[in-house]
Image (cartoon, coloured by chain):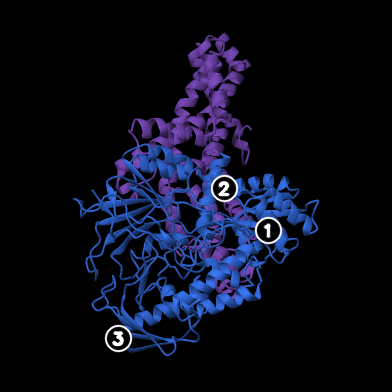
Chain colours: A purple, B blue
Amino acid sequence: MARYLLRRLAFLVVSLALASIVLFVLLRLLPGDPANALTSVGASPEQIAAARHSIGSDRPLPEQFTHWLGQLASGDLGTSFVSSLPVGPEVVSRLNVTVPLTLAAFVLAVVIAVPAGFVAAHKRHTWYGALLSAVSQLGIAVPVFWLGMILIAVFALNAGWLPAGGFPQDGWSEPAEAIRSLVLPVVTIALVMSASLIRYVRSATLDVLGSDYLRTARALGSSFGSAMWRHGLRNASVPVISVLGVELASTLLGAVVVESVYALPGLGSMLATGIAQHDYPVIQGVLFISTLFVLFIGFVADLVQRIIDPRLRGRLSGGAR
Amino acid sequence: MNAKKTSLYGTATVATLALTLTACGGSGSGGSASGGSYDKNATVNIGSLYEPQNLDNTAGGGQGVTEALNGNVYEGLFKLTDDGKVEKLLAQDYKVSGEGLTYTFTLRDGVKFHSGKQLTSADVKYSLEKVIADDSQSARKSNLEVVKDIATPDTRTVKVTLSQKSISFVYNLSYVWIINSQAKSLKTTEDGTGPYTLDKWTRGSALSLDRFPGYWGNAASNKQVVFHYYKDATALNNALLTNAVDVVTSEQSPDALDQFKSNQNYKVNDGNSTTKLLLAFNDKAKPFTDVKVRQAVSAAIDDKKLLESIWGGYGKPIGSMVPPSDPWYEDLTKVNAYDPARAKKLLAEAGYAKGFAFTLDTPNYDPHPTTATFIKSQLAKVGITVTINTITPDEWYTKVYKNHDFTATLQEHVNDRDLVWYGNPDFYWGYDDKQVTQWVKEAEEASTTAEQTALLKKVNEKTAKDAASDWLYLYPQIVVAGSKLSGYPLNGLNSQFYAYDIKKG
């Protein structure tokens, strides 16, 4: 296991290094000029050149790249071209919104989807099993922003129970306000996420229900409950965990629509603004940190799958996909 | 999903581009009932779509920095009032001599920076030099290049010598923030003389200002002002509906206005805007080199119908680059007015009886895509085929503004007094008329405002007749506020938003 961990860790570092190169090069291939965000209409060519010089985007690419790597190595994500604020602290402040939002939504989605998916499979011939299936199918088709707007209209504008959007300027030093402002966004993401999760849990459960080992266990005298618990759950959870890892990772940055609807200062909107302004240090910083998160989530998902399924232990990466 | 994405990018880009051309703007100030009792220690929450990019207006802060800091945190020698007048602010007095080439300013006594330092003439010199420095990214740089020399005979006197007469000099000074000459990192902190100090800027969320106890003038009518920033107009309106904000600086979502109009808890104020929507031809690219073609296109588009479809009952038709608040305004809506029959005739005269085709570079945020589609269908009726090419603001800036690589484009121009750009043949739209260039130059060197006004009226008439561009309409400027609020600016000239008179009942 120790050897596996070491190899997996090395894999992580190499992935990160590759990702940072790809990231850096791809960004520079985009058409446009970061100096555009800094100069206004009326600017002369000299002023534009001065803007470029002041942010260093006129220097040769290899030099810019090594500069960035050097900063990264010392734990510094650089300084925004546009705002002149350091990127690191801003990423941290955005993570203070995005991480609780994503984790809470994720947990809620799992709490909804696992029992619902199981029931939808096990009781698929009953009316409520079919209904669960149908509702989840419908849920996949619901756009996030639409659901957000409906929830805002009902719970914020009409009932007045929760804020319609925003996040306290002082963040978590106002815990009650911070939590209140995250309730609707969390529910929005969780509902949409659980719709697709239900589908996965349902099909994984169906596989297990039709499997030979379950029938054998039952034939040997196990009750349905204990056979499911001992054999079914383990087998069904392996593919579901793969999907969970992907869902969690994509929500991290994919929350940009929800952040916009609820006016939350999260990581996704930081990235969107950065892209619109060609603010390379900001884009690089956000993507680097999120790459780190995604790789880490993949690592954890792998680890958990191995613990659950001994058959996977010979392989370097990946579970049942 | 798509619609939301668009508006998200849209607002970001509006802030980026904010055609901060030359000058000022103006309008009345107000709000609802003033007087009465109000809370002197209130926090006023202001909702806005325009977050500053950084806090320095000479280094690409964008229109958001003007909105939040101009007049609130920073002050100039002069200020532009909400109704468009230029008034003395940090300048107590000034004299013009030497054929209009020498300006001697006497500074107000007892003015302190937020850091505690006294304001001196050295700070004024430093601030002016910062705007005209080689590496300045200020949009005002070209206006102030007439400054030849700045002398400081004593701590309260600044003597500026110009290389040529500039009647807009004092007006242009209302955009030069007086900063502490020893201040550092102005992109992220501040040191001004205004009625508020910067409390905190949380990027992506809010910027808060606190009343400055050492202010030289009347203290602000509220204790704290917080600008809350939104990327989505609906989210902003929801904030107003749930009292998370007290006032919205500039309403951009006409559909949402009915819910406020029909509710007595809110007041919808229709102020004077200076923002014009332009169909800008490249006057140096065929077929728009031909005046008749430009006139034909202008006459083929029903501006009133466009305005109605985008803004409902708000906004105004406009016949030239000049908004009603500029001193040289004339109603020119009848020049090249909607007349499809005339458009066809003009096209025939120009040799395009069978029409022609062109590509319209369209910024990807509202209202440009809608406008482009409207123009396309209108021009199809006179035989002109429009290909809509959707571009990002960044592409617009590089392709259209810098490289002049376009045939026609859509863009909004936000500032007042920006008619003078037609006097610059190198500007992106490439309008090149020797007579107009001469008039604009003479107007700037005029001795009296009457003379300046008369010359610019001629420019106005000539550019309108030539259909230098097609001015589609004047945007409305709509401030929506809770009915307990008073004293807020109504016109938000050039995006400034003075908060110090706002009273919360």
How packed is label 3: few (under 14 Cα within 10 Å), some, or many (20 or more)?
some
Q: Label 3, on which residue?
A: B155
Comparing labels 2 and 3, the label whose residue is closer to the camera? 2
Q: Is B290 left or right of A167, judged from the image as shown?
A: right
Q: Is residue B53 visible?
A: no
For the residue marked with disc 2, what is the amino acid? Lys
Mark toward the start of the polypeptide (2 vs 1): 1
**Foreground residue, B397 or B282?**
B282
How packed is label 2: few (under 14 Cα within 10 Å), some, or many (20 or more)?
some
Picture quadrant of residue A125: top right
Residues behind callouts 2 and 3 on a single chain = yes
For the residue marked with disc 1, what is the amino acid? Gln
User: Quarter holding the N terminus of chain B?
Assistant: top right
* Rendered location of residue B61, percent (x, y): 46, 64
**Foreground residue, B312 or B300?**
B300
Residues behind callouts 2 and 1 on a single chain = yes
**Badge 2 element:** helix
Looking at this view, name the residue that lies furthest to the left.
B37
